[in-house]
Image: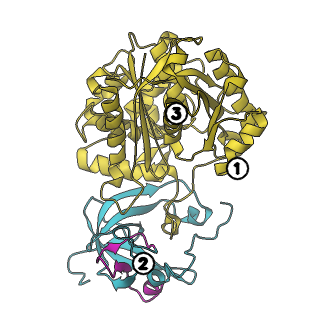
Amino acid sequence: MSSAEPVLPELTDVNRGFWEAAARGELALQRCDDCGELRYPVAAVCPRCLSARSTWSPLSGRASLFSWIVFHNAYHAAWRDRLPYSVGLVELEEGPRLFGTLVATEGTPLALGMPLQVVFEASGDVSIPCFAPRHEGDGR
Amino acid sequence: MAWRRAAISGVGASRQGKLPDETRDTLAAEALRGALEDAGLEKDDLDGLLTMPGTSSPEGGRHYLALGEHFGINPRIAGSMIMGGATGGALIQYAALAIDAGMASCVACVFSDTARTSGSRFSSSSGWTDPWGIWGMFSAAANSAIVARRHMELYGTTSDHLAAVAVTCRHHASLNPGAVRREPLTVEEHHASRMIVDPLRRDDCCLITDGAVAVIVTSAERAESLRKPPVTIWGMGQAHTLQTTAHPDWWYLPHQRAAVQDAYRMAGVGPADIDVAQFYDNFTISVLLWLEHGGFCEPGQAGPWLEGGEKIRLGGDLPVNTAGGNLSESYMQGWLHIVEGVRQIRGECGDRQVEDAELCLVTGRGMTLNTSSALVLGR
């Protein structure tokens, strides 16, 4: 907690596909080879059928806002300079939900269901998928 | 017919607050001595020890070993469990089942923590493979803020509704000599308190305190011959949504409804039969969800149902957290809710006693909003 180093993923055989895709500017999740379930969180087995076989599937990056909060308290030193910052629970167009930092929200009031688009922010050497408001005619 | 095969025969709470001269073990001993005295039992009567390690207990799942050694207890059943705020209720349930099965006769359930003195901030991030902190998502407050925001946006719940919970719990704490925060709180003061994780303000958050609680469970039959009037377990339930983001309704905590419904069914009662409730209140929003899940109002409608807090205040339809709760009494992760439930049924609560309290619903919930337990206590 005293460290100002940001929290970064620890790469393993389980999550490497997610972060390698992010480094390419893609959002990808595991799709079960046996039952077809698209899953998040990233995990070694399918929570629907327990199969260990899956394939990383690139997604549209389009999402909508399911809930959100704004941090005014620095629970971690690395985030102190970003206060206040927003985090969303977002629902991907393909179904799964995940948490993501909300960026480029200035001038766009946050609202349930508002359209979002994945964007990638660099933290050290790591590319982290975050979400920004998606506007009409963005073409993405 | 109500289950009523096990009873809570003794409850004990240590002093609460900031207690830098104490350790988690001296506090646990203070609570256990109190519970034994309350029951009229001796330490050597105990043949079960179930514990919950606090944030300041490095032993984790081996906590029962440390406490057993320190306290000189060599029981038949033993163990430690970590379910956050659902643990107290869950351990009492396992104690009751073991007693009913004949595996033990007198089980102490114990929690102690020096969270305040140790500087616990409940700031960690959840997530297994990739921690949510990668995205800045830290703390217990944040998880409940996600719930509060969606509840507000979907149903029109407001910060005034949240304040009504905080103000009511503080009022009840003002009537409790053992409570840590007893000075009055107004809605305006709540609204002026610092934003922590929008939409939750400081006065939406529970306290962080040092203290300990012990609860002694026996058979209902044995309770008849002990010091205090028996408080029996009419019904009990648990349910857990162990998936978080992957579960479509995780944010709304459907497990809470399942746990309470199981407890109602076992007790043979419904919400209209409950005289007083002790709802796990890590944050104000939690009380609103318990009111909905407990069937006291329709889903989404708890905010307006509160009538500014009158409904849940002493003298109202359903007095809630009559000792002040986690918000104002002390943050014993729901264990003091059990103590207060027992004392209300015994009629020991003085200025804060609910008249003719015959049935009390006690709930707990913990971890990343995942776990829940419920008890219906009666005579």
Tell which of B77 and B228 is nearer to you.
B77
Q: Which chain does the numbered disc 3 sit on?
A: B
The amino acid type, in three-letter code, at marker 1 is: Glu
Element type at mark 1? loop
Of mark 3 and mark 1, the one earlier in the sequence is 1
Q: Which chain does the numbered disc 1 sit on?
A: B
Residue B159 shows in this picture = no
From the image, state the color of chain A. cyan
Q: Residue at x 64, y 50 (%)?
A: B61
Which quadrant holds the N terminus of chain A? bottom right
Q: CA distance from mark 1 to mark 2?
A: 33 Å
Q: Magenta span has A72?
A: no
For the residues beneath circles 1 and 2, the answer to whether they share a chain is no
**Residue B345 placement (x, y as % from top left):** 45, 16
From the image, state the color of chain B. yellow
Determine whether B290 is above or below B184 in the image. below
Determine whether B16 is above or below B134 in the image. above
Range of residues picked out in magenta? A20-43
Residue B264 shows in this picture = yes
Q: Which mark is residue B334?
A: none
In the visual, does A58 lie left or right of B242? Answer: left
The amino acid type, in three-letter code, at marker 3 is: Ile
Determine whether B129 is above or below B264 in the image. below
Residue wearing tag 2: A52
Residue wearing tag 1: B59
Q: CA distance from mark 3 to mark 1?
A: 21 Å
**Residue B102 placement (x, y as % from top left):** 54, 31
